[in-house]
Image (cartoon, grey):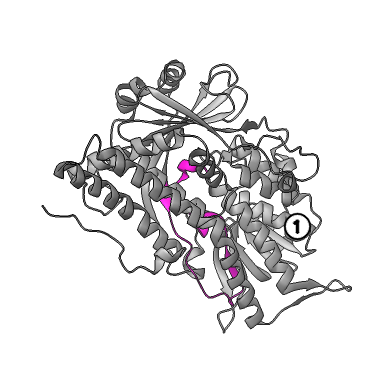
């Protein structure tokens, strides 16, 4: 039994009192939110988690610089201390026999806080997800105003008007495993992950799509000597889909392979297709990892943030609210940025009086505050979301992503001309990032959560498309090259426009055209 489990109280004891806020799920978002609401807002918080043991996940292990900054602002940086976390200064990108390296750049001293010089390098952090989550749980459970309880939340409790008044859960630490408990709280925040049970109750319109499947394994090597670019993430662009490598400790590297199908012979695919296309330095540890077994798979879900009734005293946060492809590692950055905004939201709607009571604003004021939260989060979340999903589609080239030659689940297969256009789009993206200057610094800073500017992202995306179109016309335009150039632009538009519409950002979301059909010749 670890420190976190020891601090948890019984379900019976937890339900003896009422709380200001019930937080469902003690993952990255839930544990961070519980800590700051209790410590800084003075609210009484019940933190309910299904399993308090250290989790084992194959994603949620790379925190972009924007997420590190959010941790700093929340005064939660101790969560990345003592877990052998590694600095990430940028990315190495490999395509065929070529490679480039792009860095986040220098730190803004005002954004970095005290002690940061003007030339300080911007860094993300990578680590074992389970170690990071347990440290956040330790920080939360150490707060006097946080009551930690282990239980499986099954439903929201609502009054006759539909306003949430608490949660219903089953406890694991009781003699009767079927016992159901009700916990009273003035407000509930559901942070119960991608398979959320509470999502349908709060945001009935929210639905997700499975865009691909990641197979993950841990490679053992010296991260300072055996990686092509130390202190970098590595993206290897295969013929079919990208492969990711990034350090999660001083002796371990996480490898994530995007599988073309969940039903293929995984070992054969890794050995016969992936291995020969990897950089020479990574082939031996990759082969050893495949031989060792222990491969874990995870579906990659995508779900835009859907609006919902804000006056019902319930919020969604983290993967229960919004998901994007994990290729760019932006999930924790969005979640921690949302924690900052939700902390501000509770400052606007709840005040702890001198006698210890908490006074709440009326329903209309709460609804306006929640709407402001949605508006405030949109620039950062939409930039990260669109970039993640668009970059995945581009990096898959002609394969179109999981499922082979399809742009997404449920969509028709790409034609041969579209496959060739997407391959050229991937090549153009690689060349564009390699040009340096703002062609590389702007995209990598947006990926890192440092530039929450959707319009800048759209400008760079279409700059890449036009760059690819111009290259397709060389050495001189012919009817076939013009058609190929148009197919490339059309394919790029059809990738990004549905993402813009889903996020409801920039003037392009007002354009009624969502998809450009094939030009018949």
Where is residue 215? Give x, y as percent. Answer: 41, 35
Dot 1: element: strand
Where is residue 225? Give x, y as percent. Answer: 58, 16
Where is residue 356? Give x, y as percent. Answer: 85, 71
Q: Residue at x 68, y 46 (%)?
A: 69
- Residue range corresponding to the magenta coloring: 300-329
Mark 1 packing: few (<14 Cα in 10 Å), some, or many (20+)?
Answer: many
Q: Is residue 78 visible?
A: yes
Where is residue 176? Give x, y as percent. Answer: 60, 57
Q: Which quadrant holds residue 422?
A: top left
Q: Which quadrant holds residue 152?
A: bottom right
Q: Residue at x 60, y 39 (%)?
A: 130
Q: Residue at x 40, y 34 (%)?
A: 431
Q: Quadrant of the N terminus?
A: top right
Q: Which quadrant holds residue 16?
A: bottom right
Dominant SS type (magenta): loop
* Viewer-side residue, 465 vs 86: 465
* Viewer-side residue, 48 vs 342: 342
Q: Is residue 453 magenta?
A: no
Q: Which residue is mark 1?
A: 146
């Amino acid at each position: 039994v670890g420190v976190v489990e020891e601090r948890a109280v019984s379900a019976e004891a937890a339900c003896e009192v009422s709380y200001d806020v019930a937080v469902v799920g003690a993952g990255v978002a839930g544990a961070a939110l519980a800590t700051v609401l209790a410590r800084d807002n003075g609210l009484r918080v019940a933190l309910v988690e299904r399993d308090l043991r250290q989790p084992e996940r194959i994603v949620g292990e790379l925190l972009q610089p924007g997420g590190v900054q959010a941790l700093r602002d929340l005064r939660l940086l101790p969560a990345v201390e003592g877990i052998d976390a590694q600095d990430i200064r940028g990315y190495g990108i490999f395509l065929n026999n070529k490679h480039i390296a792009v860095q986040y750049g220098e730190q803004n001293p005002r954004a970095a806080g005290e002690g940061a010089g003007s030339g300080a390098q911007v860094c993300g952090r990578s680590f074992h997800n389970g170690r990071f989550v347990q440290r956040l749980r330790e920080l939360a459970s150490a707060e006097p105003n946080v009551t930690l309880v282990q239980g499986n939340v099954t439903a929201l409790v609502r009054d006759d008007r539909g306003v949430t008044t608490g949660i219903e859960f089953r406890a694991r630490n009781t003699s009767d495993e079927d016992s159901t408990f009700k916990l009273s709280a003035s407000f509930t925040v559901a942070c119960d992950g991608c398979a959320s049970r509470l999502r349908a109750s709060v945001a009935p319109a929210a639905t997700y799509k499975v865009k691909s499947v990641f197979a993950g394994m841990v490679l053992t090597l010296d991260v300072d000597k055996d990686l092509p670019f130390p202190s970098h993430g590595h993206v290897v662009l295969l013929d079919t889909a990208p492969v990711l490598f990034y350090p999660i400790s001083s002796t371990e590297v996480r490898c994530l392979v995007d599988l073309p199908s969940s039903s293929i012979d995984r070992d054969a695919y890794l050995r016969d297709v992936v291995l020969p296309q990897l950089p020479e330095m990574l082939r031996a540890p990759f082969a050893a990892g495949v031989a060792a077994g222990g491969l874990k798979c995870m579906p990659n879900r995508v779900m835009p943030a859907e609006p919902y009734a804000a006056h019902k005293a319930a919020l969604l946060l983290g993967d229960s609210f919004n998901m994007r492809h994990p290729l760019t590692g932006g999930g924790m950055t969005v979640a921690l940025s949302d924690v900052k905004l939700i902390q501000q939201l509770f400052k606007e709607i709840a005040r702890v009086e001198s006698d210890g009571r908490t006074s709440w604003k009326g329903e209309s004021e709460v609804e306006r505050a929640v709407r402001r939260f949605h508006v405030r989060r949109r620039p950062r979340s939409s930039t990260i979301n669109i970039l993640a999903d668009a970059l995945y589609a581009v990096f898959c080239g002609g394969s179109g992503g999981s499922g082979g030659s399809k742009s997404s689940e449920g969509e028709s297969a790409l034609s041969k001309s579209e496959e060739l256009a997407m391959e050229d789009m991937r090549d153009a993206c690689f060349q564009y990032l390699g040009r340096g200057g703002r062609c590389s610094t702007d995209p990598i800073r947006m990926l890192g959560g440092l530039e929450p500017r959707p319009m800048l992202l759209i400008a760079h995306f279409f700059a890449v498309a036009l760059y690819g179109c111009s290259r397709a016309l060389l050495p001189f335009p012919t009817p076939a090259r013009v058609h190929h150039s148009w197919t490339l632009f059309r394919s790029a538009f059809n990738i990004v426009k549905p993402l813009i519409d889903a996020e409801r950002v920039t003037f392009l979301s007002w354009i009624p055209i969502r998809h450009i059909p094939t030009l018949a010749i």
